[in-house]
């Protein structure tokens, strides 16, 4: 009897198998309009050798089963719509529904990238206006919306530095990257043809000016920094840093992943940045979608404009918009067509909804929320860099490790309290990091509940660490065997 | 601001709790000389209805009332309403990359289903969980082949999408890599004799597209044999994957990658789309991008996790297999929902409809004096038509009748002036085809 009870699952939607396992021959999910031209068979068209007769294993299910399958899967997810999603460095802010609506309008979603430019003026205008707004926000002179995501923006920017220095006859070898950087920074540099030279952070978590001055020699093409950095700390000496790099013939690249801390308050173009990327899926509220699509526009100062990816959108004297492909110094194309246009649509809708005052208020709220968390949890958790932060704060699990509990365990226990965890184990310069970014979308009420949960967990760690180590208890599954998954990878269903 | 949940009183209380009197104190890390004085010069704030008006106006300045025969790497197909209804669930589109597997099983299981479907379609053994788009997936495939073979030379078919070729060139411009283009023959397919002489023992990969940029199917087994004889990998890029429902998958290839936009993702003026990359199991550890694997929880229940992350940039940094972080999970989900709905029979029927439409149109166009379809190789839903006279003039004439008559190939291939690339999906009715043919007939006369 007890066995039978344990075998039951609490709700029908917790038992959803793979779609292939629901399949049964003869079921259909769509019915097509009848064909209005003579039918041609694949064998006639390609010959028997090239023609395929079936895709083995493909699902056969009805429309309602498709609805139920994916609705049930969705109920196993946690999103910004569900609750606080304080994943540091990821900026999980509200994704407004109006953005989704306008991106789906006929004439926007349906426009083909090779549509004649005279007929695609609306889309070109959206691209032009989005680029103009981003240039204003960053204080830069020109923007390309072509890069598909932040990492591609980084590569684009570093390739532009390379092209610019090559034009000056100044071949250099290295890009300086602080040890607090996102992993994409060194990975992007590796493709660009430069090598990475690492910079150690100082005890305040910032760039060590003396170390930078030593490292910045005539072999160094530039510095790639994130500001505010991944500790959520603004590089107070940024103007001096930029001067050191410029004085020795280098350029300064800014990873704009944390631009949401600066919008309306300060502009990278005003503190010495030559080239940077933005993540529309962070600062500008386009949805993360479970891991993409992103969009990583690149913004540059005037002297780098000739090197931007081709084509660029221009406004002609008569007010019409066109694509300029005639860019002899361009680094080339980084993505087919015109970039992730649909994300530019959403980002522009976000900027229009906010206006300049709303964007500044957004920045202030994001920074206030992060500082609120920082000050309310420092009694329970170690705060390695204890000073006012910008949009995120980083604690460490140092006190809890004494009880055998690590950042990931605390994160898993947070799930039981109804919150998405923070970012664990990043940045690398904080061992056992708890990286918390509430964004402006968190209300005080929700932050108080979150703070209360983390305080309660700290107490649990003191009293019963074993209990915390087995969390979560309330999710659809308990902890998953990641080591086993990597040792014998099962990456597809097989009949 | 309507997106912000805190009241002035909340803000005041929080500020007090942080020990500050004014919000500006939290920004003191930023020296006053670099602070923005005044306001950003931006439009807004706009209400929701004003935003809608703005974008409706932009949407009206479009070709939405036109019949479009454009393909060339972006395909207009009908997407059942179920796809967008499910995609619009906030639990999917407002979630992040599934780092916390216990509360991301929905995204993870859907990705596992995506990976399975991609391998079923391409005939490969493993698939990643998506890449940015077809163009960058093809570039990633070439970089991967160089890692696998430790060779630095890539042979590209001239029938590979011109923009795809440009992107690979951009990526490797500062690396010691040689790119070689190999021409096509009269059939519109890659010239096998020229390919044979272009591939040497230093060649990492041969990259072809099938159906190629002209819509023609390439002879994959022969191309594979040429590549493999010299120890090079064969990469097949596919940007109209609907063809895979009726064309044999390129199982002789080593990497099959491309664009899955056709599966329920709108053309959206060029993006966002969804790239895919599938390969043989033995190359698994050189793959770029996220991978979802099946595992069990502590009670033995099946679950899914991101796996083999030691290939990736957040662990390996400059030694990673790629710099990609965010991929295209949401549109991989769209493709998964779309393919689930279409199912085995629906996808095949749809592919047959596309095939039939294109063949009907080709047959009708060939009947017009002066018009021809110069490439004899078999095609799926897209082909090249040679026009008697100035192609731009014909396009203009068609535009006057609200038809976008395809892509002028002369812009991409100087030797193909007055050739159009035309595509006929299920969205182009017989009536529209007949109307287009009639315009062409008048043009010919």
Image (cartoon, coloured by chain):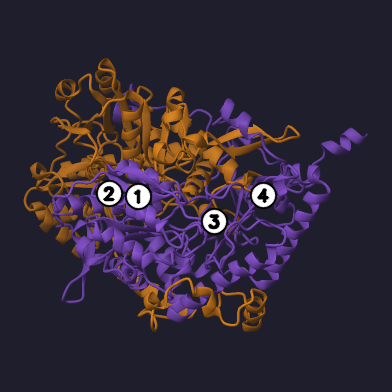
Chain colours: A purple, B orange
Q: Which residue position is annotated with label 1?
A: A176
Disc nearer the start of the sequence (2/4): 2
Whether the residues at callouts 3 and 1 have beta carbons within 8 Å, the answer is no
Instruction: Please tell me the numbered disc located at residue B93.
Output: 3
In the displayed structure, would residue A8 be above or below residue B445? Answer: above
Disc nearer the start of the sequence (1/2): 1
Crowdedness near tag 1: few (<14), some (14–19) or many (≥20) residues, C-alpha within 10 Å: many
The chain carrying label 3 is: B
Residue, far right = A1
Instruction: Have a look at marks 2 and 4 and say if they share a chain.
Output: yes
Instruction: Have a look at marks 3 and 2 and say if they share a chain.
Output: no
Spot occupied by residue A319 in the image (x, y as percentages of width and height): 20, 76
Front residue of A283/B408: it is A283
Spot occupied by residue B301 in the image (x, y as percentages of width and height): 72, 34
Disc nearer the start of the sequence (4/1): 1
Spot occupied by residue A389 in the image (x, y as percentages of width and height): 54, 66
| Quadrant assignment, res A272 | bottom left
Q: Which residue position is annotated with label 2?
A: A220
Q: Count the marks.
A: 4
The chain carrying label 1 is: A
Disc 1 on helix, strand or loop? strand
Q: Is residue A268 left or right of residue B157?
A: right
Instruction: Have a look at marks 1 and 2 and say if they share a chain.
Output: yes
Q: Is residue A110 visible?
A: no
Question: What residue appears at the point 23 percent right and 19 percent down from the top-left corner?
Answer: B201
Instruction: Have a look at marks 4 and 1 and say if they share a chain.
Output: yes
Instruction: Please tell me the numbered disc located at residue A398.
Output: 4
Front residue of A130/A18: it is A130
Whether the residues at callouts 3 and 4 have beta carbons within 8 Å, the answer is no
| Quadrant assignment, res B401 | bottom left
Whether the residues at callouts 1 and 2 have beta carbons within 8 Å, the answer is yes
């Amino acid at each position: 009897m007890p066995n039978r009870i344990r075998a039951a699952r609490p709700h029908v939607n917790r038992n959803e198998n793979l779609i292939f396992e629901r399949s049964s021959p003869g079921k259909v999910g769509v019915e097509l309009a009848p064909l209005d031209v003579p039918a041609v068979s694949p064998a006639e068209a390609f010959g028997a050798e090239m023609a395929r007769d079936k895709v083995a294993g493909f699902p056969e299910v009805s429309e309602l089963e498709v609805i139920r399958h994916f609705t049930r899967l969705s109920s196993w997810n946690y999103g910004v719509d569900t609750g606080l999603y304080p994943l540091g460095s990821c900026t999980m802010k509200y994704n407004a529904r109006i953005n989704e609506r306008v991106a789906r309008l006929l004439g926007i979603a349906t426009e083909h990238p090779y549509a004649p430019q005279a007929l695609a003026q609306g889309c070109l205008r959206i691209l032009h206006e989005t680029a103009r707004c981003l240039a204003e926000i960053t204080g830069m002179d020109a923007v390309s919306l072509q890069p598909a995501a932040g990492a591609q923006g980084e590569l684009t920017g570093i390739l532009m530095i390379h092209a610019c220095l090559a034009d000056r006859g100044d071949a250099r070898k290295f890009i300086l990257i602080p040890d607090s950087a996102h992993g994409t920074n060194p990975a992007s540099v590796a493709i660009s043809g430069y090598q990475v030279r690492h910079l150690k952070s100082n005890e305040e978590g910032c760039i060590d000016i003396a170390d930078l001055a030593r490292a910045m020699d005539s072999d160094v093409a530039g510095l790639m920094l994130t500001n505010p950095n991944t500790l959520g700390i603004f590089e107070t000496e940024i103007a001096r840093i930029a001067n050191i790099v410029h004085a020795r013939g280098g350029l300064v690249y800014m990873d704009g992943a944390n631009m949401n801390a600066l919008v309306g308050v300060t502009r990278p173009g005003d503190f010495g940045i030559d080239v940077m990327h933005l993540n529309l899926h962070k600062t500008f509220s386009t949805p993360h979608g479970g891991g993409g699509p992103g969009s990583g526009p690149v913004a540059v100062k005037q002297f780098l404009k000739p090197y931007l990816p081709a084509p660029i959108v221009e406004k002609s004297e008569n007010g019409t918009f066109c694509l300029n492909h005639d860019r002899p110094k361009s680094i080339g194309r980084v993505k087919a067509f015109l970039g992730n246009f649909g994300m530019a649509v959403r980002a522009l809708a976000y900027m229009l909804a906010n206006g300049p005052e709303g964007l500044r208020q957004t920045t202030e709220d994001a920074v206030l929320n992060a500082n609120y968390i920082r000050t309310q949890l420092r009694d329970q958790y170690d705060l390695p860099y204890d000073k006012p932060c910008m949009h995120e704060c980083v604690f460490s699990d140092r006190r809890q490790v004494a009880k055998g509990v690590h950042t990931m365990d605390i994160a898993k226990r947070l799930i039981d309290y109804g919150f998405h965890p923070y970012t664990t184990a990043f940045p690398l310069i904080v061992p056992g990091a708890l990286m918390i970014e509430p964004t402006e979308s968190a209300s005080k009420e929700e932050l108080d509940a979150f703070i209360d949960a983390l305080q309660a967990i700290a107490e649990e760690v003191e009293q019963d660490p074993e209990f915390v180590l087995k969390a979560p208890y309330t999710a659809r599954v308990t902890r998953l065997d990641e080591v086993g998954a990597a040792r014998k990878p099962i990456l597809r269903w097989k009949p | 601001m309507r997106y912000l949940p805190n009241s002035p009183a909340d803000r005041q209380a929080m500020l007090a709790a942080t020990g500050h009197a004014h919000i500006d104190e939290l920004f003191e890390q930023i020296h006053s000389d670099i602070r923005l004085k005044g306001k950003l010069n931006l439009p807004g704030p706009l209400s929701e209805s004003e935003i809608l008006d703005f974008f409706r106006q932009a949407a009206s300045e479009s070709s939405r009332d036109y019949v479009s025969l454009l393909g060339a790497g972006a395909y207009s197909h009908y997407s059942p309403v179920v796809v967008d209804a499910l995609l619009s669930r906030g639990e999917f589109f407002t979630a992040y990359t599934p780092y916390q597997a216990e509360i991301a099983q929905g995204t993870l299981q859907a990705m596992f289903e995506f990976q399975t479907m991609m391998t079923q379609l391409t005939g490969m053994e493993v698939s990643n969980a998506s890449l940015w788009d077809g163009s960058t997936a093809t570039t990633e495939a070439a970089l991967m082949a160089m890692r696998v073979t430790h060779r630095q030379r890539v042979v590209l078919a001239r029938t590979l999408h011109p923009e795809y070729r440009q992107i690979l060139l951009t990526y490797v411009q500062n690396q010691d890599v040689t790119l070689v283009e190999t021409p096509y023959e009269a059939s519109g397919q890659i010239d096998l004799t020229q390919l044979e002489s272009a591939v040497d023992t230093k060649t990492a990969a041969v990259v072809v597209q099938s159906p190629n940029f002209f819509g023609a199917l390439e002879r994959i087994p022969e191309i594979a044999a040429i590549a493999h004889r010299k120890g090079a990998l064969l990469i097949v890029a596919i940007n109209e994957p609907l063809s895979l429902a009726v064309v044999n998958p390129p199982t002789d290839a080593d990497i099959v990658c491309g664009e899955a936009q056709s599966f329920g993702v709108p053309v959206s003026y060029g993006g966002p789309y969804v790239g895919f990359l599938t390969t043989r199991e033995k190359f698994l550890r050189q793959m770029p991008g996220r991978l979802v694997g099946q595992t069990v929880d502590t009670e033995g229940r099946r679950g899914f996790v991101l796996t083999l992350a030691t290939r990736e940039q957040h662990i390996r940094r400059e030694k990673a297999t790629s710099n990609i972080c965010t991929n295209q999970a949401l549109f991989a989900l769209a493709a998964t929902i779309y393919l689930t709905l279409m199912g085995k029979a629906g996808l095949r029927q749809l592919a047959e409809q596309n095939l039939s439409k294109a063949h009907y149109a080709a047959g009708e166009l060939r009947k017009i004096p002066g018009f021809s379809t110069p490439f004899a190789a078999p095609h799926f839903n897209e082909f090249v038509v040679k026009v008697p006279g100035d192609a731009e003039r014909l396009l203009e004439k068609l535009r006057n009748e609200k038809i976008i008559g395809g892509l002028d190939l002369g812009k991409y291939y100087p030797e193909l002036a007055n050739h159009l690339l035309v595509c006929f999906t299920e969205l182009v009715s017989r009536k529209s085809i007949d109307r287009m043919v009639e315009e062409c007939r008048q043009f010919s006369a």
